[in-house]
Structure formats: C-alpha cells, structure tokens
C-alpha cells in the first residue's frame, strides 16, 4: 500500500509550511505532490524534498478555478496508476483520523478498498476573538484555537482509490454517491484568525480583476465579495452560541446522506452547504495535532 497527498498552491506560504510538516509525518516527502499555480520560488524552499510541479497560471482565465480542479483530477488519476491511495486537499485543509483510533490518517486511508471516494466529517475552525488571543505564528494552530462549526460543504470527497475520479464544484462534489469514513475529520482553517482571514480575502478579492483592471469571475464567488461583507460574516461567527455538548457527527453524516442528490442537469452528487447553528469545543484529544 502507498499513499500520495496532493495539493495546489498560489501565494500560500503560511499554510504550505504547516501542510508539509503535518502530512510529512505520515509519508515520505516524495509522496507529497505540490502543484504550484504559477511560479512561486518560495515553494521550493518550504516544500524541499516534495514532488513539486510548476504550472502556468493565466490570471485572465475566467474558468481559473474550474480548470484548477480539472488539473487536480488529472493528476490524481495519474497518481493512482502509481499509488494505491490518494488524499487530495486544499492547502488550508488538514485531514486527520480520530486520535481515539490510535491510527494515523495514512494508516486509516490505506485500509480503503479499491474504487472508492470517501468523505470525512468537517471541522471548520473559527477564531473567537473574545475568548482567544492573537495568533502566534510560531505555535501550532490547535494549541491556540479551540472552537469549530461544522460546514457540510467541507466534508469534501478527498480520500480516493477510484482511478476515474473527477471533481466538480471546486472539489466539493464528484460523480460518485456520497460515502463517509466516520473516523476521519477535515479541519478547514479559512476562519482560524480574524486578521489573517481579512488580509487573505482582500488579496483574493483583488485577484478577481484581470490584467486590464476589469472585474470578472475567475474562481469561487466568495473571492469577489467586498471586505465589508467578509467583516459582517466574521462578526456573525462571534455571536454564535457555544454548545456545551460534543458535536453529534453520526447525526451530521446521516443528514448529508439523507439529502445528497444527483444534480438535475449534470451527473455529480450535491449535498447541503449549511453550517451548524452553534460552535463546538474541539475535543481535547485533537489539540496540538498541527
């Protein structure tokens, strides 16, 4: 059994360092496949020893994100001719196994049988500015951030043994029916720090303009949102009630499985995009994993 871990980066040095350090605990660095979306010299230092492929990036491509995920699909299918298993995640996503199993994420993924595409539970870390300090970039994220919401859209189909894998909707859906590995969790770090979120959103908002300064849709709609909308969305997370109960992930999975349907026009399976109404405390067994 062999596992490759695949991602694509663009101006993502902070996350890439943590991504390489985390997944590099479980596989050889050569098994970490990093596609650079355009020339990024820093990647060669941060991910030294990984399998790095430098690609062209056309900022005027109106289908930039769709083509990005089509590229990742082609790479994943190719990797599955050489490896038995592939994990494909964005650079701000950390796939973990439940520490209660006593197994690493690669140990868990390596047990997945042939011709499968599996989804994890989602854990979207949210910075509570009233309860947590400013982020210390020298320390692990889960030593400093303790609250999360579930976000069904981030139970992404990221554990793959199906050599025909093809993603849709920016990697959130495939042509396969939704199927879960219940002991896996995808930690999504977009909201992990207020200042970082706002700075990164501003950069992406500006990327939505082409070389002539014209606004156009090159990626997910969120990239085009003005900064006051991002501020409002973050403010709403600060008002969320913090539950005193552990998240019921069995019920969470059942809700997705019960509502996943085939797209009426295309062949891929879609499922709810909503987040939980409350925040939960990250269980102690996960703290400090990355």
Image (cartoon, rainbow, N blue to C red):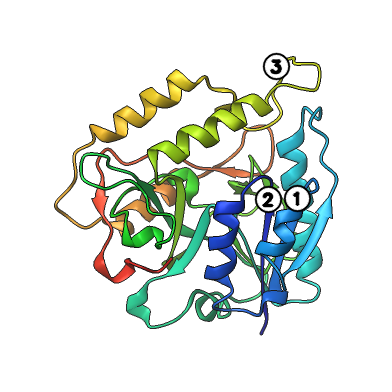
C-alpha distance separating marks 3 and 2 = 22 Å
Q: Which mark is residue 2?
A: none
C-alpha distance separating marks 2 and 1 = 9 Å
Q: Position of residue 86 (x, y in %)?
A: 66, 68
Which residue is painted at 48% across and 43% down in the image?
153
Residue under numbered circle 2: 9
Q: Is residue 81 above or below residue 215?
A: below
Confirm or deny contact between disc 1 and disc 3 (CB under 8 A).
no
Q: Nearer the viewer, residue 139 or 35?
A: 139
Q: Is residue 259 above or below residue 138?
A: above
Confirm or deny contact between disc 2 and disc 1 (CB under 8 A).
yes
State which quarter of the image contains the C terminus: bottom left
State which quarter of the image contains the N terminus: bottom right
Q: Earlier in the sequence, mark 3 or mark 2?
A: 2
Residue under numbered circle 3: 215
Which residue is painted at 58% across and 46% down in the image?
172
């Amino acid at each position: 059994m062999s596992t490759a871990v695949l991602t694509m980066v663009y101006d993502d040095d902070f996350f890439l360092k943590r991504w390489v350090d985390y997944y590099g605990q479980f596989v050889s660095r050569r098994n970490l496949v990093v596609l650079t979306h355009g020339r990024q010299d820093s990647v060669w230092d941060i991910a030294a020893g990984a399998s790095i492929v430098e690609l062209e990036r056309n900022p005027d491509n109106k289908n930039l994100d769709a083509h990005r995920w089509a590229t990742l699909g082609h790479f994943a299918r190719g990797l599955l001719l050489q490896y038995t298993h592939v994990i494909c995640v964005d650079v701000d996503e950390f796939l973990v196994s439940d520490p209660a199993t006593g197994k690493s994420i690669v140990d868990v993924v390596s047990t997945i049988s042939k011709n499968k595409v599996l989804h994890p539970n989602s854990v979207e870390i949210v910075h509570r500015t009233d309860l947590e300090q400013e982020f210390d970039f020298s320390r692990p994220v889960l030593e400093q951030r303790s609250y999360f919401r579930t976000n069904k859209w981030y139970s992404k189909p990221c554990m793959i043994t199906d050599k025909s894998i093809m993603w849709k909707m920016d990697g959130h859906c495939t042509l396969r029916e939704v199927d879960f590995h219940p002991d896996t969790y995808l930690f999504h770090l977009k909201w992990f720090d207020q200042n970082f979120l706002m700075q990164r959103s501003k950069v992406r908002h500006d990327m939505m303009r082409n070389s002539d300064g014209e606004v156009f849709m090159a990626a997910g709609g969120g990239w085009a949102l003005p900064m006051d909308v991002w501020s409002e969305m973050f403010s709403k997370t600060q008002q969320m009630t913090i539950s005193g109960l552990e998240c019921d992930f069995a019920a969470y999975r059942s809700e997705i499985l019960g509502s996943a349907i085939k797209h009426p026009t295309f062949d891929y399976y879609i499922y709810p995009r909503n987040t939980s109404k409350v925040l939960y405390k990250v269980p102690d067994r996960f703290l400090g994993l990355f």
